[in-house]
Image (cartoon, grey):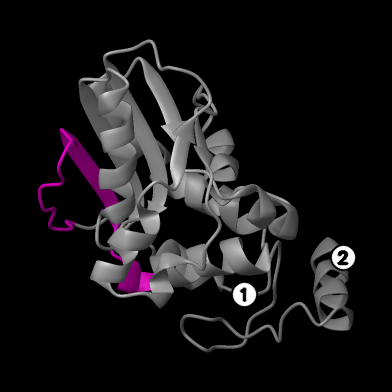
Amino acid sequence: MVKEAVEFIFNICFLSENLCSLCGKKFKPILQGYICDECIRNLRKADVPVKPIKYVKHYRIYGRYGEGWGEIIRLFKFKRVMPLADIIARKIKYDFEEYLDFVKPEVITFVPVHLLRYWARGMDHNEEILKRTGVEFEDLLVRVRWRKPLVFFDKKKRREIIRNSFSLRKNPDCVRILIFDDVITTGATARTVSELLYSAGVKEIYWYFVAG
């Protein structure tokens, strides 16, 4: 009965055509009407190659962007499909906790959206995922420059745009910090934020990305 009611609500609100965004198959939604249960089960951890990033001691990427993770993140960020935040957090939880045990950070924080984007979306996607992992974290960074998402620009332009885009709410009184972010592409954001933290006295800077 509950499943039928949810499907009915999705249909009358035009929230979904009940077609999976990944495989294209028709399905009956339970909590969300965008990605079917089979495709969610197939979202997996992958060995994603990493390249050195200046000021970053080490980082880990959970999954490949092109293997379903990009679409699930896009739907959550831009269409506010909130149940997908729970799915992402549930998928990465064990690996994330394992990485935290390896890093042993004194502070965990996240890459924030600009205040204007927060008002437009009604949420900060990285903060919402972190909340659902159950770890304690601090809202340490501030995005001070508004811009289009970096996906619209090439590597060189991204570096120019991201420069001076962040500030700190307070000086981080720690040696070791971990920053959570949903996606890594060129590494421009990671380098910029890490340089800011390094200049503030943080010596070991780690990152965890959902996809790359």
First-in-chain label (2 vs 1): 2
Q: How many marks?
A: 2
* Quadrant the N terminus occupies: bottom right
57 is within the stretch colored magenta: yes
Question: 198 above or below 8?
Answer: above
Point 73% across, 60% down: residue: 120
What residue is disc 2 on? Answer: 1
Task: Give the crowd class for mark 2: few <14, some 14-19, many >=20 residues within 10 Å.
Answer: few
Image quadrant assignment for residue 70: bottom left
Give the left or right position of residue 80, taking residue 190 as reference.
right
The picture places residue 56, in percent across and down from the top left corner, at 19, 37
Between the residue at mark 2 and the residue at mark 1, the CA separation in whole angstroms equals: 20 Å
Point 63% across, 81% down: residue: 27
Task: Give the crowd class for mark 1: few <14, some 14-19, many >=20 residues within 10 Å.
Answer: many
The stretch in magenta equals 47-68
Which amino acid type corresponds to the residue marked 1 in the rendered image? Answer: Tyr
151 is within the stretch colored magenta: no
**In front here: 68 or 147?**
147
Give the left or right position of residue 29, taking residue 46 as reference.
right
The picture places residue 147, in percent across and down from the top left corner, at 52, 63
Image quadrant assignment for residue 47: bottom left
Residue at the top extreme of this rendering: 173
Which amino acid type corresponds to the residue marked 2 in the rendered image? Answer: Met
The picture places residue 89, in percent across and down from the top left corner, at 50, 45
Image quadrant assignment for residue 151: bottom left
Secondary element at image label 1: loop
Question: 5 above or below 94?
Answer: below
- Is residue 112 visible from the viewing direction of this image? yes
- Is residue 97 visible from the viewing direction of this image? no
* Quadrant the C terminus occupies: bottom left
What residue is disc 1 on? Answer: 34
